Amino acid sequence: MDFAYTAEDEAFRQELVEWLDENLPKFLTEWSEEESPEGEADGTGGAGSGGVLSQMERRRAWQRKLNEGRWAAISWPAEWGGRDATVTQNVIYSETMARYRTPGIYNANGLWQIGPMIIRWGTDEQKQRWVPNILNADDHWCQGFSEPEAGSDLANLRTMAVLDGDDYVLNGQKTWTSSAHIAKWGLFLVRSDPTAIEEKRKHEGITALIVDLDVPGITVRPIRDLTGEEMFCEVFFDDARVPASYRLGGEGEGWQVAMGTLGSERVGTAGLAIGMRADLDAMVNLARSVNPAALDDPSLRARIAEAHIRIEYTKLLNYRALSKILRNEKNWPEVPLAKLQWSYLAQTLAELAVDLLGPQALPSKGAPGAVDGGAWNRLYVFQRYTSIGAGTTEVQKNIIADKALKMPRR
Ligand SMILES: Cc1cc2nc3c(=O)[nH]c(=O)nc-3n(C[C@H](O)[C@H](O)[C@H](O)COP(=O)(O)OP(=O)(O)OC[C@H]3O[C@@H](n4cnc5c(N)ncnc54)[C@H](O)[C@@H]3O)c2cc1C
């Protein structure tokens, strides 16, 4: 790390801290329900014992409270309710929010990905209509990219959109669409040029459409996941009509729109190391009361120390990435390394928790006597997703081999 915070950065931090000191305790008193700090309804979930969907009204209220203070979408332009925050201010924000263990927001997909894309690609009319809706948590938004044959190889997507008068007519299937069953709106990628794949130009001929999920011809079917909850869905299109005026960017420009969207996923990861450190401290403290003998076990003590070291390393990795961004250097391989480190640590901590907390950590949600209402058991199962979400482990390793190590391709 070789950067210093400017006077503006320190003033930004001070303003945020004062706002949180003023507003967070009041909010927590009003909405006293227990919740994990990490969980988001869009699939970046944490240990919340009730599952994220049961907490949506609390999340909506928190996002609205943040928005009142202009703290909901700090990277957005000031004219759309943001603060034009710099990269450094984003790091300060993520770390401070993690330190305060703030509640989850209503719609991370909307705030972090879809909103910025509408601001970047939308017409004035589209911006007026949808940007305030996302910011104020009026409706829930989902992101429909993946299909059964298009995940890591996203450009292979085949959901068809054919222009018919003033509408696109959609046919096909999406899958793994987080929170589609509670969403009113979604940003979907569709194939508007059917010849592109066979002509080996699969990144072309993709179009981004904003879809009202309540129109006829759309069926949303929740998928039950490993935790027993229904968080993501299949979405089927059967002659569903979407107005052409809902297209984001030009026809065939969907890939560019999507790449901007996925890039925004990295915003907000800087606070993860701090959140993980708090999780580690919480599980050690809890073990003192529910399973104290575990803390005398040399192998468990070594695992706690190792987790602690890796969390510190992750924090430094993030700072090194930030230093490079500030120097306008490419931050290879820090971005894929940070993703790998995040999934490794998330799973390591969840495994450590069940071993530390002993048999009482194993009963599932709602079982009598379960520690924290079964939250740690749920986390243990749920964290498997971190090797897949935001780019799979194997794909991240390919990127490191290719771009950072410059290994030859066979
Ligand atoms: C919790 C969760 C929430 C999600 N939410 C959404 C959402 O809201 N919207 C959405 O559109 N999608 C969502 N997804 C889907 C996610 O984007 C995909 O799962 C991801 O892109 C991987 O695609 P896939 O599942 O088709 O796996 P595949 O791409 O088929 O991969 C299967 C396996 O093959 C490996 N593999 C693939 N390609 C290579 C390669 N070139 N080299 C080496 N190994 C390879 C992978 O690493 C993996 O182990 C979500 C996924 C999860 C887990």
Image: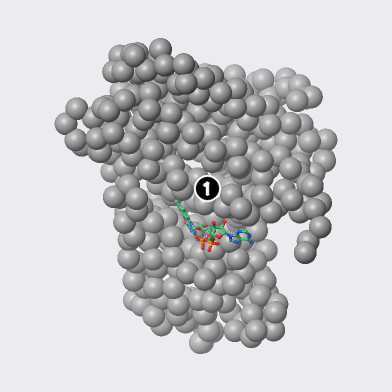
- Its colouring scheme is one colour
* Residue 56 picture location, percent across and down: 33, 44
Residue where numbered disc 1 is placed: 387
Which residue is more in the foreground, 137 or 361?
Answer: 361
Q: Is residue 200 left or right of residue 388?
A: right
Residue 188 is at least partly visible in this image: no
Q: Quick check: 129 left or right of 27?
A: right
Instruction: Point out residue 150 in the picture as x, y percentages from the top left corner.
Output: 54, 68
Q: Residue furthest front?
A: 298
The quadrant the N terminus occupies is top right
- Dot 1: what SS? helix
Q: Position of residue 96 (x, y in %)?
A: 55, 25
Residue at the image point whose x is 72% and y is 35% from the top: 321
Image position of 214 with respect to 19: above or below? below
Determine the residue positioned at 72% across, 48% down: 400
Residue at position x 78%, y 61% in the image: 409
Quarter of the view holding residue 11: top right
Place of residue 245 in the rendered image (x, y in percent of width and height, measured from the top left): 54, 73
Where residue 2 sits, quadrant-wise, is top right
Hey, what amino acid is under mark 1? Ser
Q: Residues within 10 Å of mark 1 (few under 14, many from 20)?
A: some
Residue at (46% x, 16% y) in the render: 298
Is the CB atom of the residue marked by disc 1 within 8 angstroms of ligand 1's nearest atom?
yes
Is 409 left, or right, of 197 in this rendering? right
Closest to the observer, 367 or 158: 367
Above or below, 11 against 215 in this view is above
